[in-house]
Image (spheres, grey):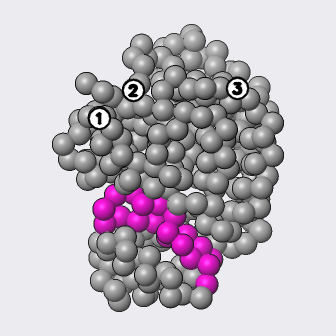
């Protein structure tokens, strides 16, 4: 069996996440406490006892999911054949394969969350899930709209997420329904992630990434930007910067991993979103989760 570790992104959080890990593992507890010091606030209090609303704040959500995923992955004896993460999850993947240290990964995730929060506040924007249309149809419809609206996530066949200005996403929703979309669902997010409106955040994150040490990984990471296996630290670094304004190519990522011999996936972290997507992309692949 050739098994890959995959890591979830924003939206997978839930109240109480990581609490059992903190209570049962001294090693995990030490890392959680170290994270509180690095972040400058007690993220664990919000993870273990906070409400859904409190956990939705980008500056809380991203470090919380990262910590849950990375500390859990570190507790496993198994070593992955490859790793990948959905958006934010790519940072968890890069700690799991040794590209980033735990501390550096957390600092970058915190910097990313703050930068994205600022970009969201600069321009009112949003995202929406589009169900039941081929990728090409969505792309054609968006190309004909004279507002900021792009495809942000290629999640699985028939499920995409669009991102952009509130006006652009609103126009797109009507046109996509007219083109035959089964549903277009507004997402409860802070702004237009993976769109040109994240350019200020991309520039800010680029500086933080430039000042962070990247090591040669123990196994390839299939990155969101190109869905290809990467082991060169310089290229990993650049792809991580570009990820903020580029789409998450999750469908192609899973397809490429399977084509390269991966036949089993382990989702590590909160939720089961990726297992569901993988089952639709590659029904023959084995998929499991640990949270």
Q: Mark 3 highlights which residue?
A: 103
Q: Residue at x 18, y 42 (%)?
A: 284
Q: Mark 1 highlights which residue?
A: 261
| Place of residue 73 in the rendered image (x, y in percent of width and height, measured from the top left) | 48, 24
Q: Which mark is residue 81?
A: 2
Q: CA distance from mark 2 to mark 1?
A: 10 Å
Mark 1 secondary-structure assignment: loop
- In front: label 3 or label 2: 2
Magenta residues: mostly which secondary structure?
A: strand
| Place of residue 215 in the rendered image (x, y in percent of width and height, measured from the top left) | 65, 26
Q: CA distance from mark 3 to mark 2?
A: 23 Å
Which residues lie in the magenta part?
147-166
Residues under numbered marks 2 and 1 in contact, where contact means CB atoms less than 8 Å apart = yes
| Image quarter hosting the N terminus | top left
- In front: label 1 or label 3: 1
- In front: label 2 or label 1: 1
Q: Residue at x 38, y 35 (%)?
A: 267
Q: Is residue 157 magenta?
A: yes
Label 3: few (<14), some (14–19) or many (≥20) C-alpha neighbours in 10 Å: some
| Place of residue 54 in the rendered image (x, y in percent of width and height, measured from the top left) | 62, 48
């Amino acid at each position: 069996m050739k098994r890959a570790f995959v890591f979830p992104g924003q939206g997978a959080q839930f109240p109480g996440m990581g609490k059992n890990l903190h209570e049962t593992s001294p090693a995990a507890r030490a890392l959680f406490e170290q994270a509180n010091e690095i972040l400058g606030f007690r993220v664990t209090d919000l993870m273990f006892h906070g409400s859904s609303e409190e956990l939705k704040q980008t500056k809380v959500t991203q470090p919380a999911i990262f910590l849950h995923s990375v500390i859990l992955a570190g507790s496993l004896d198994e070593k992955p054949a490859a790793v990948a993460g959905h958006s934010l999850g790519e940072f968890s993947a890069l700690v799991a394969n040794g590209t980033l240290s735990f501390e550096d990964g957390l600092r970058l995730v915190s910097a990313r969350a703050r930068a994205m929060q600022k970009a969201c506040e600069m321009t009112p924007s949003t995202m929406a899930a589009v169900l039941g249309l081929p990728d090409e149809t969505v792309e054609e419809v968006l190309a004909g709209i004279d507002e900021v609206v792009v495809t942000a996530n290629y999640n699985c066949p028939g499920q995409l997420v669009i991102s952009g200005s509130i006006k652009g996403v609103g126009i797109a929703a009507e046109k996509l329904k007219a083109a035959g979309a089964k549903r277009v669902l507004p997402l409860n997010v802070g702004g237009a992630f993976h769109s040109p409106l994240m350019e200020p955040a991309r520039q800010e994150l680029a500086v933080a990434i430039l000042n962070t040490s990247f090591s040669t990984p123990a196994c390839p990471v299939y990155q969101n930007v190109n869905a290809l296996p990467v082991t060169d630290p310089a290229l990993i670094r650049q792809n991580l910067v570009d990820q903020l304004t580029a789409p998450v190519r999750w469908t192609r990522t899973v397809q490429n991993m399977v084509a390269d011999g991966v036949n089993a996936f382990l989702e590590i972290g909160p939720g089961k979103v990726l297992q569901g997507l993988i089952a639709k992309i590659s029904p023959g692949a084995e998929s499991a989760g640990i949270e």
